[in-house]
Image (tube, rainbow, N blue to C red):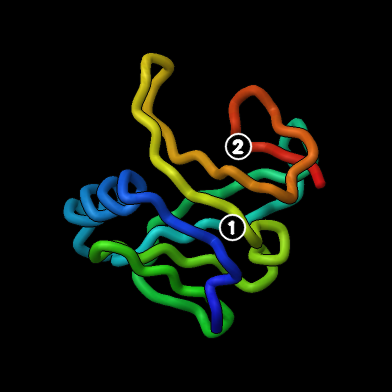
Amino acid sequence: MAEKNVTVTDACAARVSKILAGEPDNNALRISVEGGGCSGFSYKFDLVPSREEDDIVIEKNGATVLIDSLSMVYMAGSEIDFVDDLIGQSFQIRNPNAVANCGCGTSFSI
């Protein structure tokens, strides 16, 4: 299945690889969209050992990111990044479908 134009930055791929190097039982980062959060939807990040049948698989620089097909409906066109700045370290998703975001960057509305 196509990636639906979701991109993973080099910084994100490097961080996923670094995290998974210390996780022998897991081999991918799963990103999903769930109902809830202060803006209506929220992103969930999990380390997982295997893929599901409906997963969209994004591989970059040896790192694997999985997004289930239902979550992809909300994430199409997004860029997944890892940011390390004065505020802290976090995965961030720049989602062109979101019309509002919360201050923490993990919740959004469409």
Q: Residues within 10 Å of mark 2 (few under 14, many from 20)?
A: some
Q: Residue at x 74, y 50 (%)?
A: 97
Q: Secondary structure at mark 2?
A: loop
Report which quarter residue 90 is drawn in: top left
Query: At label 1, which amino acid type do we have?
Result: Ser
Which residue, given by chain and number where applicable, does mark 2 sit on? 106
Q: Residue at x 75, y 31 (%)?
A: 38
Which residue, given by chain and number where applicable, does mark 1 sit on? 32
Q: Nearer the viewer, residue 1 or 71?
A: 1
Q: Residue at x 67, y 44 (%)?
A: 42
44 sits left or right of 65 in the view? right
What is the total number of numbered labels drawn onto the structure image? 2
How far apart marks 1 and 2 lie (CA) works out to 11 Å
93 sits left or right of 9 in the view? right
37 sits left or right of 20 in the view? right
Q: Nearer the viewer, residue 38 or 14?
A: 14
Q: Residue at x 58, y 43 (%)?
A: 94
Tell me the quarter of the image containing the N terminus: bottom right
Residue 30 image position (x, y, % from top left): 47, 60
